[in-house]
């Protein structure tokens, strides 16, 4: 710097300002160079309406409207007064973003890890009539690119960056900083070879400060594509007062492995000082940014000798920065080859950067320069959210048209993270989405499977939307998910097995209340209160003939007198043919739905249920609603779902059976509805819900049943079954006895419910009963029935034995800890060792007669004998349970002294059984069902549908 004197090039104005002026002066007069559209270029005319691209007259590049690149903002036109003939078409309109804090364009189909030039243009043109050019921030992906400070209405601002794009897409985002509405006029993307601009890498991007072509003959000539295959803009700088121009028409070649590939057209012109003794000088000032107070700068100077030097002519010069060598040696440009000097590490901390190019003492010719580029560097170390998470949440955003502020990267920067998302920010890995709260977001349609791709999500709240369809089981694959809230939607189907497993192993908290169409009882898809079913249908299709036959059989079924529980009444001889029992009443013989109960119209049901307002629960064929008859009697109305064809035959079967069986321990039907396609059954209301709820401790009052209450429930249930088996001819087999099908009224009196699977059993004609469909519920199914496909009354005995074990132990039919285990096997092993303490429900606190419990356990084990012949009949069971109850009741209030004293000698749990064989078989049967059907026990939900 020592001998330098200022050149005349710019006494007062900053380098940057000059660059801007150059851009302004030449905007819109880009020279035509006919070329086809280039591969790899994306050229967007922001705010251009429609869907059709146009070819720009001057560049012959194809410009696309921007609708496909963004989903925010609106199209605007610049004011007419700013339209000049020379203004490029893309500056006439823009897109402005008044409504969002961050608005983004997404450029897709890139190659991850490649370098790209991104160029954004902004022509204000007082489009909003406010005469107030805005200031806002520009981001490339998740990294700050530049502040956009629009200072005038009539000159476009052009910003360019060279960045390495880590993904196969890149977003350019405008961020509102409170100083006016962001807008954009154009957006370009150009691919670069990885070897170019080595200063741009994964952690650092280059933001163009100026790119100057020295000495062109036409000072309006911006060199760009196709003269520059990379479509960089090279702005002309001509100052005849200060410099002489040099030029050649010969091609200037790039050297091997050229890092910058300056185009020949730019390198064909150069300047030398007009006064040969002077230096070439130029400078730029540091421009501290709010986010980067000491920006770093990269300079690249391009040199090529354009004159064929004679004899001993020498052009040799030093390049200095602020008086210190920029380049360590004297530099001699090569004839017609482009070369460059540059700094690899950015200069920082200087207020002004004076470049001086001085001839050496030996040089016979003045210094020369062909072109210069100056960049500031930006950090690109912000890492975008995990790309799989981004894809998933983007798909979710698109599917549900989520509004909110969902633009740009979901998690980065933190200050602009999407509303409703929570992210984790690890140091060594990309941010992940860990929580999604889309409650009250107006979501419509089914649950997107894209949620399944949010692999790190722990909390997913989709509550209070209008989501329909079933719950995808794939959600259970989200191993980090601990809370899934689906409350308040219109979901249907049942809780998928995978999710049930997650609930059972305690890893997931599922909330699904207030979904009126959802089967909310995982075990049995049933109402919390009454009448429902869930059968296991083994793969063989239902044979229609069998259905018809069974309906006929049902029609022929005869049960003894109403309201009778005693088996002492005479029963018609069993060896008579069923035909002889056809009731004489005309109500039976003609149509399957000419029942003796009250017949309701659909309109009446609407009134009874107050337009089906309150859902009690769900059955296999539809919802069960709360209702009140005209006289105030509370009823439960099971309405067959219009969409469910599957339940028709069970529905008919249940109506048929309920029409003629009457017993105090069977839930009674008050009436039915067959009104057009509407079918419904009206039952007595059972306010205490299912036995299952009471066993699990989820009963209405949250308390636990005493042993005496349990015994009464067992006895009453047994009497109900006994009536089906003995009071009807041919006997009826319930086929789905389980704790959820035993309902309790206000006095905790038990009634058997759900006769949808009930079949008549005719010992003289087994073909009437044998169907190809195995029904029942996992954990309750008689292994012999399973093996033979022939249900018998002993199948119900077996299932009842399981219920009895549940009553004794307070445990579910299938224990889950650690392995799925039948309660039969579990109890049998302990009882065999005389370990009654380990079996009996500890919540009874030992307040029970020990012998009574042992006797009941003995009954239960006999009922669950492997071979049906070894099981007692329900009549035997009723008699034995009566004895149990007497033992307990005779205990009076003073049973406490017997607490904890159990004796295996009081009963032999092995009697008549092969314990091991049975246990094994049951277990295997369970496992088979498990694999094929994945029915589990009802999980305990923290929240759920209103129980009643
Ligand atoms: C912009 O100008 C075009 C052509 O003159 C016109 O069709 C369009 O409606 C204008 N758009 C707006 C937002 O004013
Ligand atoms: C924007 O540019 C104007 C004109 O150069 C300048 O006065 C103003 O300070 C700039 N605004 C910001 C926020 O840098
Ligand atoms: C840069 O050059 C100008 C004149 O050309 C001089 O006044 C200024 O001090 C120089 N700055 C530095 C940092 O060398
Ligand atoms: C200038 O020329 C002299 C004599 O030929 C030589 O010794 C010296 O190294 C040269 N200087 C440079 C900078 O090349
Ligand atoms: C989820 O979003 C809703 C609605 O915006 C809000 O009321 C609720 O507090 C949010 N839940 C959590 C856990 O932040």
Image (cartoon, grey):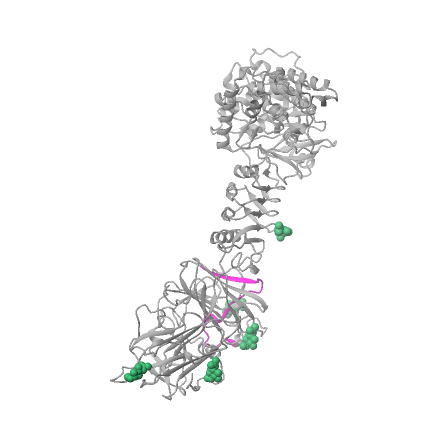
Looking at the picture, how far across and down is residue 65, in whole percent?
46, 64
Residue 567 drawn above or below residue 192: above
Residue 633 drawn above or below residue 573: below
The residue closer to the viewer here, 373 or 201, is 201
Please tell me how many numbered marks the rendered image carries. 0
Q: Nearer the viewer, residue 537 or 811?
A: 811
Left or right of residue 525, residue 883 in this image: right
Q: Does residue 797 appear anywhere in the picture? A: no
Where does the N terminus fall, quadrant-wise? bottom left
Q: Is residue 482 visible?
A: yes
Q: Position of residue 507 (x, y in %)?
A: 56, 41
Q: Is residue 187 covered in magenta? A: no
Residue at the outermost left position: 311
Query: In the depicted view, which residue is nearer to us: 428 or 71?
Result: 428
Percent across and percent down for residue 588 are 61, 21
Magenta stretch holds residue 90: yes
Residue at 58% across, 53% down: 420
Residues in magenta, as a range: 82-107
Image quarter where the C terminus lies is top right
Closer-to-camera residue (581/257): 257
Q: Up-down: is 347 above or below 899?
A: below
- Residue 650 occupies quadrant: top right
Where is residue 727? Give x, y as percent: 63, 16
């Amino acid at each position: 710097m020592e001998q330098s004197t200022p050149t005349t090039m710019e006494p007062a104005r900053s380098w940057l300002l000059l660059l801007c002026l150059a851009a302004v002066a030449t905007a819109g007069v880009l020279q035509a160079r006919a070329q086809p559209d280039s591969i790899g270029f994306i050229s967007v005319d922001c705010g251009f309406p429609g869907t059709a691209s146009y070819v720009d007259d001057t560049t012959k590049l194809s410009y696309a409207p921007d609708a496909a690149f963004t989903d925010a903002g609106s199209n605007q036109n610049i004011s007419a007064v700013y339209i000049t003939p020379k203004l490029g078409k893309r500056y006439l309109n823009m897109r402005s973003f008044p409504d969002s804090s961050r608005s983004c364009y997404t450029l897709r189909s890139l190659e991850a890890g490649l370098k790209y030039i991104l160029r954004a243009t902004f022509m204000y043109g007082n489009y909003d009539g406010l005469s107030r050019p805005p200031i806002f921030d520009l981001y490339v992906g998740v990294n700050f690119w530049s502040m956009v400070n629009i200072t005038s209405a009539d000159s476009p601002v052009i910003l360019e960056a060279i960045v390495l794009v880590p993904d196969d897409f890149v977003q350019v985002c405008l961020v509102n900083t409170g100083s006016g509405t962001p807008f954009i006029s154009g957006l370009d993307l150009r691919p670069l070879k990885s070897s170019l601009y080595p200063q741009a890498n994964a952690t650092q991007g280059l933001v163009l400060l100026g790119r100057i072509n020295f000495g062109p003959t036409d000072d309006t000539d911006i060199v760009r594509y196709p003269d520059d295959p990379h479509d960089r803009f090279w702005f002309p700088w001509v100052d005849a007062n200060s410099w002489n121009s040099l030029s050649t028409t010969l091609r200037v070649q790039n050297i091997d492995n050229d890092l910058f590939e300056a185009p020949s057209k730019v390198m064909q012109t150069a300047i030398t000082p007009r006064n040969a003794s002077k230096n070439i000088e130029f400078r730029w000032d540091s421009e501290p940014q709010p986010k980067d107070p000491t920006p770093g700068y990269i300079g690249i100077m391009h040199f090529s000798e354009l004159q064929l030097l004679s004899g001993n002519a020498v052009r040799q010069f030093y390049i200095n920065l602020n008086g210190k060598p920029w380049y360590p040696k004297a530099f001699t440009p090569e004839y017609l080859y482009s070369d460059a000097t540059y700094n690899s590490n950015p200069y920082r901390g200087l207020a002004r950067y004076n470049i001086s190019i001085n001839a050496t003492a030996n040089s016979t010719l003045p210094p020369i320069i062909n072109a210069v580029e100056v960049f500031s560097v930006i950090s690109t170390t912000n890492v975008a959210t995990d790309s799989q998470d981004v894809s998933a949440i983007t798909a979710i955003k698109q599917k549900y048209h989520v509004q909110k502020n969902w633009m740009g990267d979901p998690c980065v920067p933190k200050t602009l993270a999407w509303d409703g998302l929570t992210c984790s920010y690890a140091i060594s890995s990309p941010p992940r989405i860990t929580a999604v709260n889309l409650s009250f977001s107006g979501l419509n349609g089914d649950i997107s499977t894209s949620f399944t791709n949010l692999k790190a999500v722990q909390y997913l709240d989709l509550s209070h939307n209008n989501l329909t369809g079933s719950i995808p089981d794939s959600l259970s694959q989200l191993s980090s998910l601990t809370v899934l809230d689906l409350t308040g939607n219109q979901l249907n189907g049942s809780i998928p097995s995978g999710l049930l497993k997650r609930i059972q192993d305690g890893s997931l908290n599922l909330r699904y209340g207030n979904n009126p169409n959802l089967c909310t009882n995982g075990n049995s898809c049933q109402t919390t209160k009454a009448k429902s079913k869930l059968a296991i249908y083994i793969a063989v299709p239902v044979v229609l003939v069998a259905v018809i036959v069974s309906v006929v059989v049902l029609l022929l079924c005869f049960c003894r007198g109403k309201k009778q529980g005693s088996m002492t009444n005479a029963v018609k001889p069993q060896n008579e043919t069923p035909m002889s029992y056809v009731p004489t009443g005309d109500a039976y013989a003609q149509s399957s739905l000419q029942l003796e109960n009250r017949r309701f119209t659909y309109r009446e049901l609407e009134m009874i249920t107050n337009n089906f307002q309150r859902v009690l629960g769900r059955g296999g064929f539809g919802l069960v609603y709360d209702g009140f008859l005209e006289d105030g009697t509370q009823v439960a109305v099971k309405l067959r779902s219009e969409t469910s064809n599957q339940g028709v035959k069970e529905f008919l079967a249940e109506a048929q059976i309920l029409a003629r069986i009457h017993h105090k321990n069977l839930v009674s039907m008050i009436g039915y509805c067959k009104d057009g396609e509407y079918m419904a059954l009206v039952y007595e209301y059972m306010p205490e819900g299912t036995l299952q709820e009471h066993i699990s401790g989820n009963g209405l009052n949250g308390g636990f049943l005493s042993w005496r209450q349990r015994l009464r429930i067992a006895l009453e249930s047994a009497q109900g079954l006994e009536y089906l088996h003995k009071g009807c001819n041919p006997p009826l087999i319930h086929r789905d006895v389980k704790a959820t099908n035993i309902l309790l009224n206000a006095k905790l009196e038990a009634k058997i419910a759900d006769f949808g699977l009930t079949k008549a059993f005719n010992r003289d004609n087994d073909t009437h009963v044998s169907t190809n469909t195995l029904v029942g519920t996992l954990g309750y199914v008689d292994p012999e029935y399973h093996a033979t496909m022939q249900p018998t009354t002993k199948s119900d005995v077996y299932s009842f034995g399981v219920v009895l074990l549940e009553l004794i132990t307070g445990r579910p039919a299938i224990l889950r800890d650690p392995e799925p285990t039948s309660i039969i096997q579990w109890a049998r092993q302990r009882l065999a060792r005389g370990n009654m303490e380990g079996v009996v429900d500890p919540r009874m606190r030992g307040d029970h007669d020990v012998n009574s419990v042992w006797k009941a356990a003995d009954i239960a084990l006999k009922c669950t004998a492997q071979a049906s012949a070894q099981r007692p009949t329900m009549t035997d069971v009723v008699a034995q349970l009566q004895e149990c109850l007497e033992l307990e009741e005779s205990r009076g209030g003073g049973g406490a002294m017997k607490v904890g004293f159990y004796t295996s000698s009081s009963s032999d749990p092995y009697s008549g059984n092969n314990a091991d064989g049975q246990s094994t078989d049951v277990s295997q049967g369970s496992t088979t069902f498990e694999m094929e059907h994945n029915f589990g026990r009802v999980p305990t939900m923290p929240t759920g549908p209103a129980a009643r």
